Image (spheres, grey):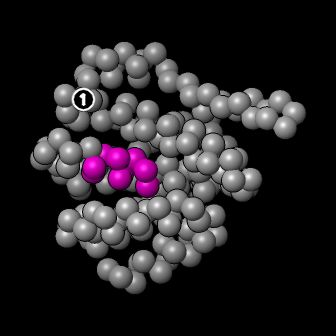
C-alpha cells in the first residue's frame, strides 16, 4: 500500500506487482483457490486489507500501529479464504491454509529486525485468534455470530486486540 500525505489529506493506493496480477489473471481465483493462486490471492487480500483498515482508521481519526495493521491483515486473509471457499462450496483444508499463512511464510532477508519481529508477532497472534474463530464459529457454522465477533475485533486498537486474543486462548 502506498500513502501520500498532502496537508490535511491522505491519499492511499494499492500496488500489486505485475507477477501477482498476471498469475491471478492466469489462475483466476473466481474459478477456485488452489496451490497455483492462493499465495498471490493472499498477497492481494493483504494489500486490500491494509487499504481498507487504514482508510477506516483515518476516517474515524484513530491512530494505528504497524503491528495492528499486519495483525488485522493476517486475520482478514484467513477469514476471506474461509468465506470464499464456503461461498464456492469448495472443499477446503484449514490446516493447509493455517500452515501457509502462519507457519511456512518467509520474510525478505533485507527486512530490519524490527520488521521481522513485527511480522512474526502478527502471525503468531493471528494464528491464536484464527484458531479461536475456527473452533467457536466456523466449525459450528455460526457465521452471523462470527461476523459480530470479527466486527468488534476490527474496531479494536492494538492493545485491545492483543488482550482479546490472549483471552480467547483460554477458550480452547
Quick check: 138 left or right of 169?
left
Q: Tell me, yes or no, whether the highlighted magenta stretch contains residue 102.
A: no
Mark 1 surroundings: few (<14), some (14-19) or many (≥20) residues within 10 A:
few
**In which quarter of the view is residue 6 placed?**
top right
Quick check: 55 left or right of 37?
right
Q: Position of residue 77 (x, y in %)?
A: 40, 47
Residue at 37% x, 15% y: name it.
22
Per the image, the residue denoted by label 1 is: 30
Taking 24 as reference, is 127 above or below it? below
Q: Position of residue 5 (x, y in %)?
A: 79, 33
Q: Residue furthest bottom?
A: 170
**Residue 11 appears anywhere in the view:** yes
Q: Position of residue 28 (x, y in %)?
A: 26, 23
Quick check: 75 left or right of 131?
right
Image quarter where the C terminus lies is bottom left
Q: Position of residue 23 (x, y in %)?
A: 33, 20
Residue at 24% x, 29% y: name it.
30
**Residue 101 appears anywhere in the view:** no
Residue stretch rendered in magenta on the structure: 75-83
Image quarter where the N terminus lies is top right
Amino acid at each position: 500500500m502506498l500513502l501520500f500525505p498532502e496537508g490535511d489529506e491522505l491519499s492511499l493506493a494499492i500496488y500489486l506487482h505485475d507477477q501477482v496480477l498476471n498469475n491471478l489473471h492466469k489462475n483466476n481465483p473466481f474459478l477456485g483457490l488452489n496451490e497455483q493462486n492462493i499465495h498471490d490471492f493472499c498477497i492481494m487480500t493483504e494489500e486490500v486489507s491494509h487499504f481498507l483498515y487504514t482508510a477506516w482508521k483515518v476516517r474515524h481519526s484513530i491512530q494505528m500501529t504497524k503491528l495492528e495493521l499486519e495483525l488485522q491483515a493476517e486475520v482478514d486473509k484467513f477469514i476471506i479464504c474461509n468465506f470464499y471457499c464456503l461461498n464456492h462450496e469448495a472443499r477446503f483444508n484449514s490446516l493447509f491454509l493455517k500452515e501457509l499463512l502462519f507457519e511456512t511464510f518467509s520474510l525478505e532477508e533485507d527486512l530490519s529486525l524490527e520488521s521481522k519481529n513485527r511480522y512474526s508477532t502478527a502471525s503468531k497472534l493471528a494464528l491464536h485468534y484464527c484458531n479461536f474463530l475456527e473452533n467457536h464459529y466456523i466449525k459450528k457454522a455460526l457465521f452471523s455470530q462470527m461476523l459480530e465477533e470479527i466486527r468488534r475485533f476490527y474496531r479494536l486498537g492494538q492493545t485491545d486486540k492483543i488482550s482479546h486474543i490472549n483471552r480467547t486462548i483460554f477458550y480452547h
